[in-house]
Image (spheres, rainbow, N blue to C red):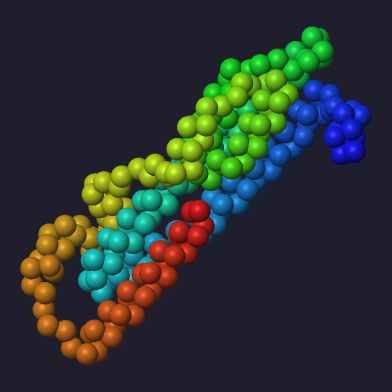
Amino acid sequence: MEKMMNILKPKPNPQQLMRDWQRRLRQECRNIERQIRDIQREEKNVQKAIKEAAKRNDMGSAKALAKELVRSRQTVNRLYENKAQLNSISMHLGESVAIARTVGHLSKSAEVMKLVNNLMKAPQMAVTMQEFSKEMTKAGVIEEMVNDAVDNALDSEDIEEETEEEIDKVLTAIAGETTAQLPEAIRKEKLKQPAQSVEDAEENVDDEEELEEIRARLARVRS
């Protein structure tokens, strides 16, 4: 019975498909914008924590936090790229529908297929773009994707490697002269390894807990 209902159910015309896809693409763009705002809001807390760590000469924590900040900024850059590609898909779909008004059906778009394929490699977009891919393949807008590309997208985030130079730049920009000699300070700190009092040890435990809490918050808004 359900199969019969699906057969009798009228298929959406190209304009209806396009409006639905574009509406969902706009929603994805708004989700990205919200995620970027959340990350940038959390980055302010990280910057404050870096300054506080530098003031107490806790260069190890300052550098660890700077590394998290570099990763967050890389994530934001990737999110902006994802948003730009979503907007490009929407624009190309509009062009496809304009052509469909003349020929009576949606034609394949190599550019849309390329953009969808790129976004399927982005961890935050992989599942959503799989759904779009199936629908657009069924509608004849793109060809069926190679499954390997999807699997690889879900298995790896392909995080860019943070360089020491980038981290040091962040430290210098945020903490100024306090961290200008950071690499040397860290080396000296590792070599000296002074004995700790009970009070110092307890304070370090508190600092470590705060550092882990900040990392956890950043990880949540980046995911």
Percent across and percent down for residue 191 are 8, 68
50 vs 159, nearest the viewer: 159
**From where the camera sits, is residue 80 visible?**
no
Residue reaching furthest bottom?
A: 198
Q: Is residue 177 above or below residue 31?
A: below
- Residue 8 sits above or below residue 216 on the image: above
Q: Quadrant of residue 51?
A: bottom left
Q: Is residue 172 left or right of residue 80?
A: left
Q: Is residue 130 left or right of residue 191?
A: right
Rendering coords of residue 204 (x, y %) = 27, 79
Residue 40 placement (x, y as % from top left): 49, 55
Residue at the far top: name it. 103
Spot the residue most to the front: 1
Residue 122 vs residue 215, the one in the foreground? 122
Q: Residue at x 47, y 64 (%)?
A: 217
Q: Residue at x 42, y 52 (%)?
A: 72
Kindly identify the residue that appears in the image at 23 percent across and 85 percent down.
200
Residue at the location (8% across, 72% down)?
Answer: 192
Report the number of discs: 0
79 left or right, relative to 137: left
Of 107 and 197, nearer the camera is 107
x then y, percent, for residue 206: 34, 80
Depth check, front residue: 199 or 160: 160
Look at the image and tell me in which quarter the N terminus lies.
top right
